[in-house]
Image (spheres, helix red, strand yellow):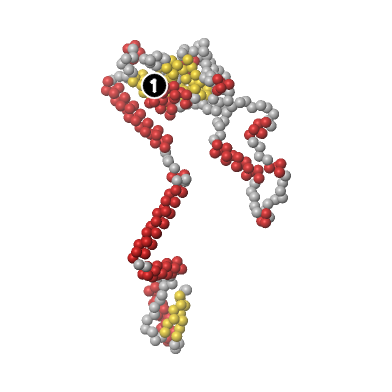
Amino acid sequence: MSMCFRQAARRTLLCTASAGSSGSTKQAIKFGTHHVHNNLAASTTILQRDFSAAAKKKQANNGNNNNKAKELTYQERKEAEKKLRRETYEQKQTRLERLKTRRDHSPKDVKRTLFRSWWDKEMMYHNKLQRMAKKEGKPWRVRVAVMVERLPVVTPDVEEWEQDYNDLRDFLETFGKEYPAETGFMFAPDKSEDHVVESDEDMIAGLPFTPAPRETEADASGDVKTLDRQLKTRLYLTIKSDTEGNLSGPRWTLPSTIAETNESLLAAAERAVSDSVGSDLKLWCPSNAPMAVNMRVYNDKLPESFRENYFGEKIFYYRVQYDNTGGDVDEAAMKADDYAWLTREEVVDRIEEERGKHQAKFFHYML
């Protein structure tokens, strides 16, 4: 009620007085949903608040519970409270079991946390190297490395859950919704042959041509020097070379070169590929900016002619894409000792085998 009970009582008294002046002995006054019977002989009028149904029910239950509690002994009350606590605990455990299957309670930011645990340490190490180079007063040499990638040729394999979803969607689209017969919503039944869901094998068999296989001969033989392999994923051109001045000799790496004076990084990237595997490859660079940078400190055991007066190298990585119009590695003009078209996992495995997990982690995130 928007009107307070004091105002209601005042209005009721006024109405009672007016009714008494007219000579009536008893008057019933209706105010909203409240009926108040007033007697002229009464000196006061009392208004009673009409509680809601829920409040009345709660009052009744409390009263019944209080009466029952008075009837129970001390030991019985303890047993009842213990039973209530047990039921509450079991309900809570049941709810927690249900929450385990919900998406909101699944582990979150797992990969992000794992990446940040590596990235933060890597940045601290790079900042430390910057301070050391500045303290010794030595400059950095600029090296440009190139990730030559071949994009996937065919679509990747469908996950099992995704295939189940596609099958269910095809089934529903074919048969439509079904309603009980008594509703009269369903149309007359069609022919059974109109509701046949073809499998992928049946669709392929009905094509006027024979599709190329998703698995090639190179996949079966393990040939890594061809682009006709691993069609469902990306491949990266990897070479085996000692141009980086390695003490252990040639190792697997990406095509790279030292940037010359007054040469742009992109021009140095193009020269790195042509010097390593020839100029027959047709490449496309999506950006003039590098996508990653790493630092390498020169070891004192490296030849003085190679180290010169530099503290180390800043390696800028470019990502370029192989153009499917043609071209491949020119083995006759190749200066590298060996080459291979590898997947990201294969590149990481070879880097880890030669340089350790720390460098392999960098290539894992970069590729």
Quadrant showing the N terminus: bottom left
Badge 1 element: helix
Q: Camera-side residue: 266 or 60?
A: 60
Q: Residue furthest bottom?
A: 23
In the figure, 88 relative to 268: above or below? below
Identify the residue at image location x=67%, y=54%.
181
Identify the residue at image location x=47%, y=74%.
33
Residue 132 is left or right of residue 182, and the answer is left
Residue 68 is left or right of residue 300, and the answer is right
Identify the residue at image location x=58%, y=21%.
217
Percent x, y for residue 97?
Answer: 44, 48
Whether residue 272 is visible, yes or no, is: no
How many numbered dots are placed on residues in this image? Answer: 1
The amino acid at mark 1 is: Arg
Percent x, y for residue 286?
Answer: 49, 26
In the figure, 127 relative to 78: above or below? above
Instruction: Name the residue tied to disc 1.
Output: 355
Whether residue 250 is visible, yes or no, is: yes
Identify the residue at image location x=57%, y=28%.
154
Residue 21 is left or right of residue 203, and the answer is left
In the figure, 204 relative to 137: above or below? below
Which of the 4 image quarters holds residue 139?
top left
Neighbour tally class for label 1: few under 14, some 14-19, many 20 plus, Cα within 10 Å? few
Percent x, y for residue 301?
Answer: 32, 14
Which of the 4 image quarters holds residue 195?
top right
Percent x, y for residue 362?
Answer: 40, 27
